[in-house]
Image (cartoon, rainbow, N blue to C red):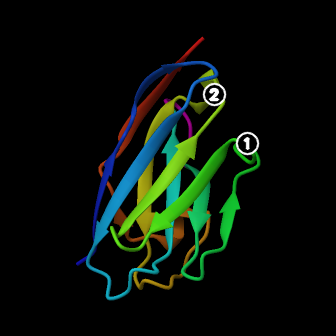
């Protein structure tokens, strides 16, 4: 059973930075695929960033150049570094993992059976 635990959310002023962490257990490989999603009040869940098993990454256009996803295999942890935050980034952030360490994976939430509990990010003007 794959388990995910997010941490690192909080409140920050516009222009500030936060780093989210997602600790993962249950895969047989430390080179696993994982994605971050977010959901703002009254909106649907949006794929933010994904890191594939091979290490390549992909981002939503709204965060490209501001957010960076990375993976520390030794710690089985994936990070989301968020810079230049603005009020539109306010949301609950979730990490999500696929059924196998290699995937299927992407920015479509339907690909992921395993989800963390979420961590709130609030950006004030």
**Residue sitting at x 66%, y 30%:** 84
Q: Residue furthest left?
A: 1
Q: Are marks 2 and 1 in contact (CB under 8 Å)?
A: yes
What residue is disc 2 on?
88
Q: Residues within 10 Å of mark 1 (few under 14, many from 20)?
A: few
Most foreground residue, 27 or 88: 27
CA distance for labels 2 and 1? 9 Å
Most foreground residue, 61 or 84: 84
Horizontal placement of 36 versus 30: left or right? right
Q: Where residue 78 sits: x, y (%)? A: 44, 61
Most foreground residue, 30 or 42: 30
What residue is disc 1 on?
62
**Residue sitting at x 54%, y 45%:** 81
Q: In terms of image quadrants, where is residue 16?
A: top right
Q: Where residue 7 sits: x, y (%)? A: 32, 45
Horizontal placement of 76 versus 25: left or right? right
**Residue sitting at x 51%, y 55%:** 36
Q: Where residue 77 sits: x, y (%)? A: 38, 63
Which of the two labelled residues, at mark 2 and mark 1, occupies the earlier sequence position? 1
Q: Where residue 64 sits: x, y (%)? A: 74, 48
Q: Residue furthest front?
A: 74
| Image mark for residue 52 | none
Horizontal placement of 41 versus 115: left or right? right
What segment is highlighted magenta in the picture? 41-45
* Secondary structure predominantly adopted by residues drawn in magenta: loop
């Amino acid at each position: 059973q794959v388990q995910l635990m997010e941490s690192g959310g909080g409140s920050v002023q516009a222009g500030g930075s936060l780093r989210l962490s997602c600790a993962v257990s249950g895969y047989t490989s430390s080179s696993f695929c994982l994605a971050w999603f977010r959901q703002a009040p009254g909106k649907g869940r949006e794929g933010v960033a994904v890191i594939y098993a091979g290490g390549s990454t992909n981002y939503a256009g709204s965060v490209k150049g501001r957010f960076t996803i990375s993976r520390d295999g030794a710690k089985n942890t994936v990070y989301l570094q968020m810079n230049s935050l603005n009020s539109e980034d306010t949301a609950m952030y979730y990490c999500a993992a696929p059924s196998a360490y290699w995937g299927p994976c992407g920015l479509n939430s339907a690909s992921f059976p395993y989800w963390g509990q979420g961590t709130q990010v609030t950006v004030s003007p």
